Image (cartoon, rainbow, N blue to C red):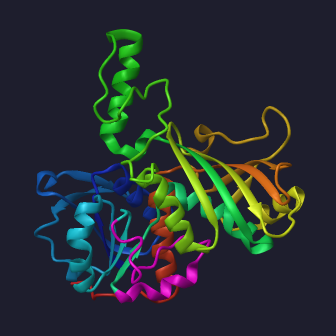
Amino acid sequence: MGYRVAVVGATGAVGREMMNILEELEFPVDRLHAIASRNSLGIEVGWKAGVVKCEDLAQFDFSRVDLVLMSAGGDISRAWAEKIGAAGPIVIDNSSAWRMDPDVPLIVPEVNPDAIELAHRKNIVANPNCSTAQLVVALKPLHDAARIKRVVVATYQSVSGAGKQGMDELWDQTKGIFVLGPSQPKVFPKQIAFNVIPFIGTIRDDGFTNEEAKMWEETHKIIDPDIALTVTCVMVGHSEAVNIEFHEPLDEDDARDILREAPGVIVIDKRDGQGFITPKEAQGEFGVYVSRIRRDPTVENGLSLWVVSDNLRKGAALNAVQIAQLLHERGLIGQKALA
């Protein structure tokens, strides 16, 4: 018998991708409910060979389902996740609302699967920030081999992380530059088309943005609080330039071999003009790709590398479904009899 699954935020990009990946990975779903706001009531979204109609979040009885995948933003998650969990199902939440709650496990299945045993504390499991997810998949096997001392990361993030409004603004500005004349930024603080913006989220008193803080806070919770990590987040297409300093020596060839054996990692690293991965090539793929692995000669035990992943997949929807698979494998999802 499979599970009754609800996807909250089913009309959004991540919600739709969650449904696609549930099907791709053949997760055992007996009945799927697409949940959205009242404004989306009755809207049809694709599921397997057909469609399902969206149901109203405020009216839905969550005691009828076993598992909830939630991607409706932090405000909705803060208002609803605990209520849903109290009704019985486990909630896998894609927002930042619960990530740093000590009673909510923050999971990347390739990195810290055993933390899933804490899932029933609140019946909530948190999905990390999309940039954190791909970063820790690459860092964990190297940390196990030589203990990471310090990491410096510059992310280059897709506008899809800002949702449909962000993608629409990129499209409108692109058209404007070639056809219609310039348009004023509305979603982003400056022009995003044919540009990069070294600022994502909201600014903090220390000069970092909340997007940058998420990455070190979540990495500390998932891997090790002793790793010193500093981040600059730039808006343009999900990839990361990563500089790592280790406590112990780690040769670049050994690092390459370790990463090739690591779950979820695909190494593409040849020293020629084609021997690396780009965000465009990672689009639609499941893996975390690592390229340009090389020694950093400015520190005693240093490596630099390039990390790329599809932010809607491993950064959000895929990781959520992998968490669901982990819950299933460990027998942590209760089942309600089908009516």
Instruction: State which quarter of the image contains the N terminus.
Output: bottom left
Given residues 128 and 26, the one toward you in this image is 128
Residue lying at the far front in this picture: please name it: 205
For the point 86% across and 56% down, which residue is it? 252
When the figure is inspected, residue 338 is found, relative to residue 151, above or below; the finding is below
Q: Residue 240: x and y, percent?
A: 62, 47
Judge whether residue 231 is colored magenta: no
Judged left or right of residue 51, residue 171 is: right
Judged left or right of residue 72, residue 271 is: right
For the point 16% across and 57% down, which residue is it? 37
Q: Is residue 127 visible?
A: yes
Magenta region: which residues?
97-121
Q: Residue 112: x and y, percent?
A: 58, 77
Given residues 285 and 262, the one toward you in this image is 262
For the point 44% across and 67% down, which residue is it? 127
Given residues 147 and 8, the one toward you in this image is 147
Q: Main secondary structure of the magenta part?
A: loop
Judged left or right of residue 231, residue 293 is: right
Q: Residue 130: x and y, percent?
A: 49, 56
